Image (cartoon, rainbow, N blue to C red):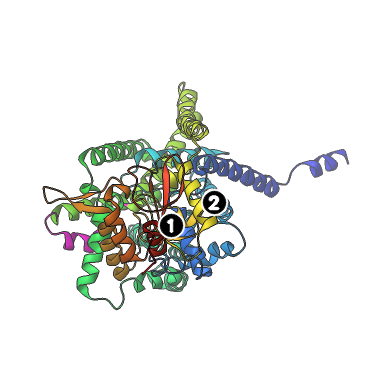
Amino acid sequence: MEQQEKNELQPHPVQEKLRQRWIEGALIFAVFFVHGGAPSPNTNETYYLAKAKHYWQPDWCAGDMFLESADAHLTFYWTVGWLTNFFPLGTVAWIGRVAAWGLLACAWQRLSSCIVRVRFASALSGALLIWLIHQGNFAGEWVVGGVEGKCFAYAFVFWGLAAMVAGRWRLLWPWFGAAGAFHVLVGGWSVIVAALVWFGERREDRPTLVSMLPALALGLLLALPGLIPALNLTSGVSAEIKSEASQIYVFDRLPHHLAPLAQPGLVVARHGISFLFLLCVFALLNHLSRDSTSRRTNPASRICRFAWWSVAFAAFGLIWELACWNHPALAASLLKYYWFRLADVAVPLAVAMLVCLWLERLVAERRRWAPQALAIAMLLPTLHLVQISATRFQDSTPPADGKMVSPAAWRDACQWVRDNTSPDAVLLVPRLSQSLSWYAERRSVVNWKDVPQDATTLLTWRDRYYDVYWHVDEENLYVPYRSLADQGTARIRKLAKQYGADFLITREYPPLQIPAVYSNAWYTVYDLSPEAFAAQRGTSAP
């Protein structure tokens, strides 16, 4: 009787396993929270959430060129963006972050536990993943940060990879289809690379293509909300416009993601050396783990092959960029598809898993230096998280305002605009500003960050951007003005008339011969309306 009561008090194995998963998931979430928990808005949140709010409230910043351009992320707008109807943008950002980090933590715990069957190894591998992506990315990809569509897409990719390493191929394709719904390129590249991994399996270890057709069809159906808007970005436009838009997107706007070799030499060297070092570590760990990854059906083997194939596509992207160096139109026609994106995640992912497998083997074999190796593996990502936390403690500037001189003064000027101007006012703003709509809820003529994704509007953005912020110098080269104030009164009045701008926010020096309606230590707000000019000159407005 006593033995029976004792057995009843013991935790049930299923409950114990579930409790362990929750604890591991909470630890992973905590790691993601520390890494990605910068003050809002984060770099891309002004881009995605402002677009999402305008999608649900077309009168909000109506007429803004970027906000009224084609909608490329409908799934994100319908799953996260509708919250902008009820909460401020900053609140929506944090709700979206928590949701994305929670899904990523659950998915990562599942994937890691399929490969490294040691308690709490998923927390260590998750911390290693974040640190390795931060240190070793080649083309600027990230997984945990501000909320946007790809954060949710990568969560579904991790779930799909968990199905892949377990040999559940029919379940993989719907997961990747869901990823494609949130971000068509993240899901699309994952499908292509996973298909190559499947093809490399022995026939007796993989399902036939025919048997997977229903799962593939379901994956495609799930991906349609992301695929159709992406296809519409270039529908109905000429081949010349498509080509020119691709070149603008690849070489003018996003070379750090799409054409890495087009960046300054020091930037290429820094990121290239970091990624090559990470790749060498990957190859070494793959070699050291050959006993446990030699069978092609082994979970670690499948993850390694997934990573190697992603590296192969990144290598092709580099070869294509070099081969088409003097033919930008041809180069951009393929480089616009983000050939380097998946390798930036897949290689750190594989390294994180292999490190944990290697540590598991060291501990099992009772190697003398196993504790030291484990301590180092835990210390490196911990130092990264401590450094990030210390930096934020010293400087709480939101990443979206990081390029602004005196972000506090910028937010103050935006607040004045919000409180003292008409909701339909149009503003000329500094070139690197990106948060006017976030703080002031007003539309801008143009800025660097808010680049449309459809081909036609992208050309309009390019022409407007260079017209407003750049000029030709003595050597017949395009160079940016230091500030809008440096352009002088006559040119600002011309831009105001050309683009219908009502106000200007710029540095306080040099002063312009335009009515100033607000000023703080760093920024001045000028009234560009004809009535203000007339009042200044003592005449009536035309």
Looking at the rendered image, the disc whose residue lies closer to the viewer, 2 or 1, is 1
Please give the label number shown on residue 5. none
Q: Quadrant of residue 283?
A: top left
Give the x, y percent position of residue 333: 22, 64
Q: From the viewer's perspective, is 24 left or right of 291?
A: right
> Residue at point 62% right, 62% down?
86
Give the x, y percent position of residue 393: 52, 33
Answer above or below: position of 477 versus 58: above
Q: In the image as oriented, which residue stretches furthest toward the top? A: 368
Number of other residues with Cα within 10 Å of mark 1, as a class: few under 14, some 14 to 19, many 20 or more: many
> At numbered mark 2, what does the secondary structure look like: helix, strand or loop?
helix
Q: In the image as oriented, which residue stretches furthest toward the right? A: 1
Answer above or below: position of 330 versus 511: below
The residue closer to the viewer here, 160 or 484, is: 484
Indicate the quadrant containing the N terminus: top left, top right, bottom left or bottom right.
top right
> Residue at point 34% right, 52% down?
341
Q: From the viewer's perspective, is 259 left or right of 419?
A: left
Q: Name the residue under label 2.
A: 97
Question: Which span is picked out in magenta?
Answer: 325-340
> Residue at point 27% right, 39% down?
276
Residue 445 visible, this angle: yes
Q: Does the magenta stretch include residue 460?
A: no
Question: Label 1 near label 2: C-beta < 8 Å?
Answer: no
The residue closer to the viewer here, 458 or 408, is: 408
Number of other residues with Cα within 10 Å of mark 2, as a class: few under 14, some 14 to 19, many 20 or more: many
Answer above or below: position of 101 versus 220: above
> Residue at point 30% right, 37% down?
274
Q: Mark 1 points at which residue?
A: 47
